Image (cartoon, rainbow, N blue to C red):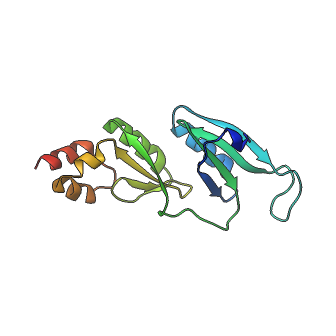
Amino acid sequence: MTSFVEYPRISPFLWFDGNAEEAVEFYISVFKNSRKLGEFRSPTDTPSTPKGMVLTVSFELDGLRFTALNGGPGYKFTQAVSFVVRCDKQEEVDYYWEKLTAGGEEIACGWLKDKFGLCWQIVPARTMELLRHPGAMQAMMKMKKLDIAELERAAKS
């Protein structure tokens, strides 16, 4: 694991139920400009982790550093926390939506839950500008994956 000294003051620390390595490999495969930075293995046997088991994996997704913890079944992700992915074009929205919903579920208004239970918002860069128009807000409320062209049309009406 890379030293926290090298991290920004604030960075996400994600709790997984024994599948942190799998999750990190998945996220690195989805986001370009991403990489695994290191891992930390248990130096001793404990009741919950045998010696040598991966405890944490540090990784970077498009410049943002994360740590994934094999914390066990005690905690689950909720929709109370999500990561926003800004997309400049519909092709990007489609790409991230397809990759992150695989094995997961669509929620609403650009939100989804991936196969690990982590929530994401896949949003066009112009979302807030478009939603200033009541028609665009009404259109978005009917969508799961956001459609930029449809939001633009609704913003003009």
Residue 78 percent across, percent down from the top left: 51, 64
Residue 64 percent across, percent down from the top left: 55, 40
> In front: 58, or 17?
58
Location of residue 106 with respect to 95 vertically, above or below? below
Location of residue 94 with respect to 109 vertically, above or below? above
Residue at image coords 16%, 50%: 154
Where residue 45 sits, quadrant-wise, is: bottom right
Rendered-image quadrant of the N terminus? top right
**Horizontal arrangement in the rendering, residue 24 relative to residue 138 (left or right):** right
> In front: 133, or 21?
133
**Horizontal arrangement in the rendering, residue 38 relative to residue 28 (left or right):** right
In the current view of this chain or complex, which residue is farthest to the top?
Answer: 33
In the current view of this chain or complex, which residue is farthest to the left?
Answer: 157
**Horizontal arrangement in the rendering, residue 140 relative to residue 48 (left or right):** left
Residue 60 percent across, percent down from the top left: 60, 39
In the current view of this chain or complex, which residue is farthest to the right?
Answer: 44
Location of residue 51 with respect to 35 vertically, above or below? below
Report how many numbered discs are placed on residues in the image. Answer: 0
> In front: 20, or 10?
10
Residue at image coords 29%, 49%: 128
Where residue 85 sits, quadrant-wise, is: top left
Residue 143 percent across, percent down from the top left: 28, 55
> In front: 135, or 29?
135
Residue at image coords 47%, 48%: 100
Residue at image coords 38%, 37%: 92
